Image (cartoon, rainbow, N blue to C red):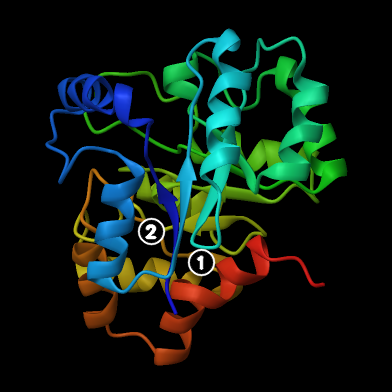
Amino acid sequence: MIIDIHTHAWPEKVSGKARENLERIFGEKMVCDPTVPNLLKYMDKNGVDVSVICAVATRPAQVPAINDWLFGTRSGRLKVFCAMHPAYDNWKDELKRIKDRGDGIKFQPEFQDFYVDDVQLMPIYGEMERLDIPVLFHCGEELSGTMKVRSSPSRISKVKERFPRLKIIGAHFGGFRLWDEVKEHLLGKDIYLDTSFFFGFLPDVEAKQLLLEHRPDRLIFGTDFPLVDQKKDLGFLRELDISEELKEKILFRNAQLLLYKPA
């Protein structure tokens, strides 16, 4: 079985505009329009059983509408990490909705203009910890390399120290292009690291070393589809010289324990 913890999709009426904006910002071409039917199509083609759609609200007012769409999209094959914005006033009630109808939250500090360890986020993190809602942070640089890094490994580590029971997923292996800082601040800690924009961005031997130095139960497969075809990252992982047991944990078992609560 394969679970992709980090994918994206938009309602079809706005997917073309979303693709155009993101390709311009990142300087990368998507493999297809970011729609739910296309995500399911590529999942079928690549043998991916479950994907998590991650959403970001760039303005506070967007939060409830984005999440309404996500709740309607959620299914047996599609889980949802919902939108939240640091300046959204009704965050406490929205967290209750997310707890009841979603699977987690996605923050994108560069697009949302906040640092992950800002004091304004602390009440939100505290309530997420209390409700046991996982959170996935964009971590490290952006592909364009032109934005401030508001989600460095050291800042992620500070949040974890303040909220030790908060389930944190560091996208892009905890810090895209900041691998030395990842080693210093995140490896070995109780923080999930996803593999999106990790494979292929550093030598295989270094990727193997980083995987082996982190907790084997805190590694999760993610791709950032449709910025990357899931097939590409699956190929990298399958060819990597690590044990089949560890590959299974990365591809499925760790995410399963994170996303599916015991009956």
Compared with 94, 251 (above or below) is below
Residue drawn at x 55%, y 46% is 80
Measured from the top left, where is residue 204 in percent x and y? Answer: 22, 70
Q: Is residue 185 visible?
A: no
Q: Is residue 169 left or right of residue 247?
A: right
Please report the residue visible at 12 percent of the width from the left and 37 percent of the height from the top. 29
**Looking at the image, residue 129 lies above or below residue 202:** above
Which secondary structure, mark 2?
Answer: loop
Quadrant in the rendering for residue 240? bottom left
Q: Residue at x 45, y 38 (%)?
A: 139
Q: Name the residue nearer the viewer: 62 or 173.
A: 62
In terms of depth relative to the viewer, which is nearer, 242 or 245? 245
Q: CA distance from mark 2 to mark 1?
A: 8 Å
* Residue 116 located left or right of residue 2: right
Res. 238 visible in picture = yes
Q: Is residue 108 above or below residue 229?
A: above
